[in-house]
Image (cartoon, grey):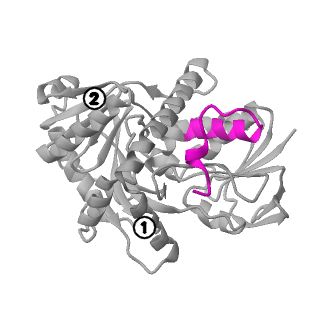
Amino acid sequence: MSKIVIVGGGVVGLFTAWYLRKSGADVVVVDRGDFTDGCSFGNAGLLVPSHVVPLASPGMLKKGLANLFRPASAVAARIAPDADLIQWYLKFTGSATTKHVKDSIPVLKDLSMFSKSLYTELKESGDLDFPLWDKGLLMLYKSEKVGAELLEEAEIAREAGLKVDELSTAQIQQLEPDTLPQVSGGVHYHSDAHLNPSALMAALVAALKRDGVSVISHCKVEKIQSSGAKAIAIETEKGTFEFDQLVVSAGIWSQQILKQLKIKVAVQPGKGYSFKVKANSPIYYPALLSDANVAVTPLGNGLTQFGGGMELGYNGYKINQVRVQQIIKAVGEFYPTEQGMQISQDQIWQGHRPCSFDGLPYIGKAPGYSNVFVGTGHSMMGVTLAPATGKLLSELMWGEKTSLEMNPFRINR
């Protein structure tokens, strides 16, 4: 039986452990946290095959430059004399082209649809017990400029084969009769779904433990031992773990860990915020409030999560209250019943999405090593793409034919 160590206990690492264990491997997952404080735990929980346009696009480049010195903007970019950060910006700028977007659309669509099918398979089989709602996603807008951008993206999604409906204000209010969103219009992506991310993480950890996977928290990797073209062990604060194969899926810390093996991945944190509240009126559909880049996720029993913000290059843990207040303000503008929310400091979650320079994840075997594999750089789509990433890595590590072409996700691109 192959002994595999996975560094990183986020949703990508846990799904990789899931598929490797189902294939018969002896798996150990180590994480520097406690499996309840990372991006996988507090993210929006949206499964978004609709997001076929990569982060590295002319539109995002333009938005980032326009908002560079606006502290209250939804997108911010840190400027600092940091070699990795500067290199990331240069690579991102070089990738933010119309050609890259065109080439990436079918890649992201196939990967996310494959992932959604795996979620559906897991849910229907009963192998993993987690709440999953298949209601699609509403993309709502107020300004005509944002509306024009959304309709353009909707047409791109249609051309990629996704079912999309344009909605009027009246139609949106029919879907949300209790909150009556104040919008100019919106788009309904029927391809999408949503789940409760904290419930998913808890279910994964519990199921893996039942299946015999060792799940070790508060276990920071201090050193990777190697011999020639093989990594052989990791040294941690909880001891040394030897292995036959190593998977690094540690989110924003993957870059630092892989540097020990002289493996480069261009990943930078994209910091975001969220909080959960009991809504004054029921919200039935997950939504993106596109003018403010705010996500709305109904979690059942009246609980709703609101989140947003993209602070590129920010790896600290100080809460930017300006951005939190912008989320609160946007929610009140779109949903009048939710105006005036009072959010305490301890309700606010923050996390760092691992953003690759080109908006595609890194999935595959690390160059120069026969037994090191990588799964990181999923940006805002970690939950969406996690099952597919885990399944592909499992297939790759067992020498099987992979379900998708792997070249777009290669590590040395």
Residue plotted at (79% across, 53% down):
370
Q: Is residue 310 above or below residue 210?
A: below
- Asked whether residue 167 is drawn in magenta, I would say no
Residue plotted at (80% across, 38% down):
25
Left or right? Give the position of 33 relative to 49. Answer: right
What residue is shown with label 1? 89
Residue furthest top as drawn: 124
Q: How crowded is mark 1: few (under 14 residues within 10 Å), some or many (20 or more)?
A: many
Q: In which quarter of the image is residue 150?
A: top left
Q: Where is residue 200 in the image (x, y as percent from the top left)?
A: 54, 36
Looking at the rendering, the stretch of residues picked out in magenta corresponds to 386-413
Residue type at numbered disc 2: His
Q: In this view, does 129 lie above or below 153?
A: above
From this viewpoint, is residue 380 visible? yes
Q: Which of 123 and 112 is in front in this view?
A: 112
Please tell me whether mark 1 sits on a helix, a strand or a loop.
Answer: helix
Left or right? Give the position of 55 relative to 14. Answer: left
